Amino acid sequence: MSYVVCRLKKHGVSVFLIVISTIIRSTFALGMAGYSKYVFDGIESRSATFGNVLLLGLFVTAWGAVGLLLKNICIDSLVGRLSYDMRSAYMASVIQCPAGKLKDMGEGRILTDYSQNIGAVMELVRSGLELITIPFELVISLIYLYYCNWILATVVLVTFPVILLSGKFIGKQIQKIRSRYMIHEDNIMNLITRIVKGIEVIKVHNYQPTMLKEFQNQIDGQLELDLRRAKYNGIFSGVTDFFMGLPFTIVYSAAIFLVTGSRFTVGTLTLFLQLLNKITVPFVAYSNVLMRFKGAKVSVDRLEELILEEKISDTSISGFDGVAFENITFHYPNGKLLLKDCTLSLENGKYYGIIGGNGTGKSTLCKLLMNLYQPVTGTVTYRKNAQKKNKIVYIEDNPVILFDDIIRNIVVEGQADDARLERILQETELKFGTVDNIEGKRTDELSAGLLQRMAIARALYHVGEEDILVIDEGFRALDAENRNKMYKLVKSYQKKYHLLVMDITHNINETDRFDRVILVEDEKAHFTN
């Protein structure tokens, strides 16, 4: 809630206008009740005229319409701005969040948060404003009701605590259901993501029934929660409906004696009933809104876990002469220990090969180097050199597609260096014709091998003097001939720019091209030569 409250303070003008419009709307409710009394008493005493009734009615109606118009415009504008702020802040947090944290969250959680939970911000603000405005209207009406007949008002109001208590209990149950429902939603989003990514394997091996059954199991859990929520909502509706009708039954019964005894006029009775309506309806609405508010708060609190958590101040590394791993220990949360007390010293200008079995921690070692993961203990130290502006460049094993067109995936940002781009396209053999022709092609037109070359081209386009180049099995989608070409190309860049290269490979026969080899096994990383 702290982030939403902070943003509300920055939109103080909108909040102020909402308060003003609420006051206008509340006085309209009282004005309409008074208008009813004036009309019925005027009819009874024959003092009311058509003109007076019409003009007064038009004024009261216009007053209420202006209040409602202003209130809705201000609320919708405020909700729109807050939703915009939350979306921007959430995606900024996702992009800045440590890679390990995002991996723990999973794609499903992120998709659920953005597609559904941010929408809960709107519900939170709307229901929160109602939680403030409803009591305001209720108190004004209650004061007027006591003015009319305090004994009768007290009798009918004793029924309201029952509604409040039932709403409080049921609201807690619905809040618990909402929390469990979101966990199911995360799992469903994760499953859908895996199905879409693996649709070719699913179809070829005829796994459709299995995946559909898995999906069915997940939505069965959601259905169970929906039915439980429906049960509690039904109980609350029945209880509130009974206790909403009870005060009117009491008033109508008492009116038989009060009007007959000339203690009430028909106009006063009408006024009393309208005021009572202005109390009972908001009172029940308050409990409903409170439950909606609690449900939305669960979603918003989950969003704020990421938005408000402490981030790494700067994931970029620049200006260094080599890197040192000092007593590094790393494991994933509740996961297998990958590295323990590892110490390595890496020099600029050297080509390091990293070998080891699957799951031994080769990629993890490189991600620690790139500051994507943080060690559990130990430090990764960059020997600072203020005279340099070197950086880390990365060739990933599964090419990351950031944009639809090839050229933008290589250049990423800023104005392209046409000469450099032209040369790299030729070197990586992505050149189909002229650069203009390449620019018109989309990434979905490329094979796995060409996508891998695109990732290589992106890294080489951005690499500079004495940078670190990390290659995480970045050639495995290429055939033997093209893999050899790309090895030679990277090696030429390594010599040209005096790069520190970290190259993960499974091929022991390729180790002769490395200056030094790092073996990762048995939770250790050490040089073999």
Image (tube, rainbow, N blue to C red):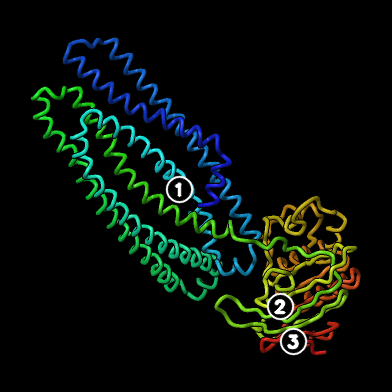
- Left or right of 302: which side holds 357? right
Q: Amino acid at mark 1?
A: Leu
Of the two numbered discs 1 and 2 on the same chain, state the one appearing first in sequence.
1
Q: Please, what secondary structure does the residue beneath circle 2 have?
A: strand
Q: Which mark is residue 378?
A: 2
- At x 86%, y 71%, the residue is 321
Whether residue 198 is visible, yes or no, is: yes
Q: CA distance from mark 1 to mark 2?
A: 43 Å
Task: Say if residue 429 shows up in the picture.
Answer: no
- Answer above or below: position of 141 versus 230: above
Relative horizontal placement of residue 487, taking residue 238 as reference (left or right): right
Q: Is residue 498 left or right of residue 91?
A: right
Q: Residue at x 74, y 76 (%)?
A: 479
Expressed as whole percent of the image width and height from the top left, the position of residue 245 reads 19, 41
The crowding category of the residue bearing disc 3, from other C-alpha atoms within 10 Å (few below 14, some 14 to 19, many at least 20), is some
Amino acid type, label 2? Gly
Three-letter code, disc 3: Leu
Q: Secondary structure at mark 3?
A: strand
Q: Residues within 10 Å of mark 1 (few under 14, many from 20)?
A: many
| Residue 14 % position (x, y) | 53, 35
Numbered disc in front, either 3 or 2: 2
Can you give x and y, in whole percent of width and height, for residue 299 in the image? 47, 56
* Helix, strand or loop for disc 1: helix
**Quick one: label 2, few (<14), some, or many (20+) residues within 10 Å?**
some
Q: Quadrant of residue 488?
A: bottom right
Q: Marks 1 and 3, how far apart in space?
A: 53 Å
Q: Quadrant of residue 438?
A: bottom right
Q: Are marks 3 and 2 in contact (CB under 8 Å)?
A: no
Label number found at residue 519: 3
Give the residue number, with chain letter if any, for mark 1.
Answer: 124
Mark positioned earlier in the residue sequence (1 or 3): 1
